[in-house]
Image: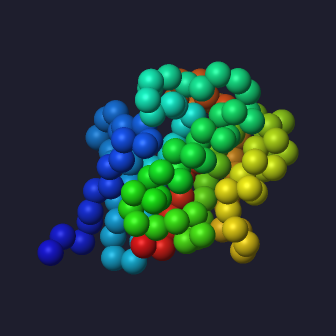
Amino acid sequence: MSTRIQVRTEAAPQAIGPYSQAIVAPGFVFCSGQIPLDPATGNVVEGGIDEQTHRVLKNLTAVVEAAGASMAKVLKTTVFLQSMSDFAAMNAIYATYFPAPAPARSTVEVARLPRNVLVEIECIALA
């Protein structure tokens, strides 16, 4: 029996490169960072931090659910922002995707994200 199961869903952008959308290991789901790509087109969604944060969290939700979990089972997230000036807007939208108690979280500003997007989010959830 394998201790690692690869998660794949068409409801989120496909992994391009040597990584998986998520891996399920005993008791946990480890989700790769999601960026604001429309899974139907592969293009970055139009708009600013609001539209991008919604798309990222929709993609993350799709991966978590494909792994058999839910956003209520998310234990920890890491948010990568191109600019901390977007924190308040991202945070307001982020709060609508997670039931209480909210998961533990780290938020960091980074120099650059793939495709020059404004936000990327990864998570660890209970399986």
Q: Residue at x 57, y 46 (%)?
A: 58
Height in image: 17 above or below 107?
A: above
Identify the image's colour scheme: rainbow, by chain, secondary structure or one colour. Answer: rainbow
Expressed as whole percent of the image width and height from the top left, the position of residue 7 reads: 33, 55
Q: In the image shown, does 73 or 124 lie closer to the viewer?
A: 73
Height in image: 43 above or below 61?
A: above
- Asked whether residue 110 appears in the rendered view, the answer is no
- Asked whether residue 61 appears in the rendered view, the answer is yes
Q: Residue at x 66, y 41 (%)?
A: 54
Q: In the image shown, does 65 or 94 lie closer to the viewer?
A: 65
User: If the image is split into quadrants, where does the C terminus sit?
Assistant: bottom left
The single residue placed furthest to the left in the displayed view is 1
Q: Residue at x 57, y 34 (%)?
A: 36
The single residue placed furthest to the bottom in the displayed view is 27
Q: Is residue 2 left or right of residue 125?
A: left
Q: Residue at x 31, y 35 (%)?
A: 17
